[in-house]
Amino acid sequence: EWKKMTVVFATAKGNVRKNTLEDFININNNGKIAMKLQDGDDLVGVMPCGEANDVLLATRDGKAIRFGVDAVRVFRGRDSTGVRGIRLLGNDHVVSMSVINDDADQFILSVTENGYGKRTPVGDYRRSGRGGQGVANIETSKRNGKVMASFAVVDDDQLMLVTNMGQVIRIRVYG
């Protein structure tokens, strides 16, 4: 069963990779290297996925790309950096990764650093090949600020936000 299950990794520099869970069965007490990272790169997300799923990468400058999990080959070892998931411009970087399906009830919620958010149906993100620049996800203006997070949600979900002053805000996703 472990051979049939896969996990996808995404980095801040836009790289993605996919491994079978079989690669992580035996883990020593001191851990195991799961993915080689380039200098200055960080791991943004790791999620289980199936071949019918899509990956959505969202960037700090308001771009997003959606591509099929099947566009990323299964890596046999754990010591490579993966392949390009999104082409980044300037100082942009990936802030989050979501594994999505074609569920009509699923949305992508993007939240900016100034507290603004946008909920977009998954169907509004066209499926493309990996490695492109993506499409506009949310406006990153002076009012909104840069994107802090972007993730898949459904109407029943709730969101908890914490301000810089420590105030907690809880809201429903469906508005």
Image (cartoon, rainbow, N blue to C red):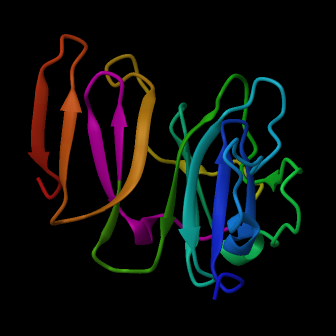
Horizontal placement of 84 versus 110: left or right?
right
Question: Which residues fall within the magenta stretch?
Answer: 109-128
- Foreground residue among 37 and 112: 37
Q: Residue furthest top?
A: 165
Query: Can residue 120 be found in the magenta stretch?
Result: yes
User: Where is residue 31 drawn, in percent x and y?
Assistant: 69, 45
Q: Is residue 102 above or below residue 76?
A: below
Rendered image quadrant of residue 46 = bottom right
- Foreground residue among 126 and 155: 155
Horizontal placement of 127 versus 77: left or right?
left
Seen at 74% across and 30% down, the residue is: 41
User: Where is residue 74 drawn, in percent x and y?
Assistant: 81, 72
Can residue 129 be seen in this snapshot? no
Seen at 41% across and 67% down, the residue is: 122
User: Where is residue 95 drawn, in percent x and y?
Assistant: 54, 37
Seen at 63% across and 51% down, the residue is: 134
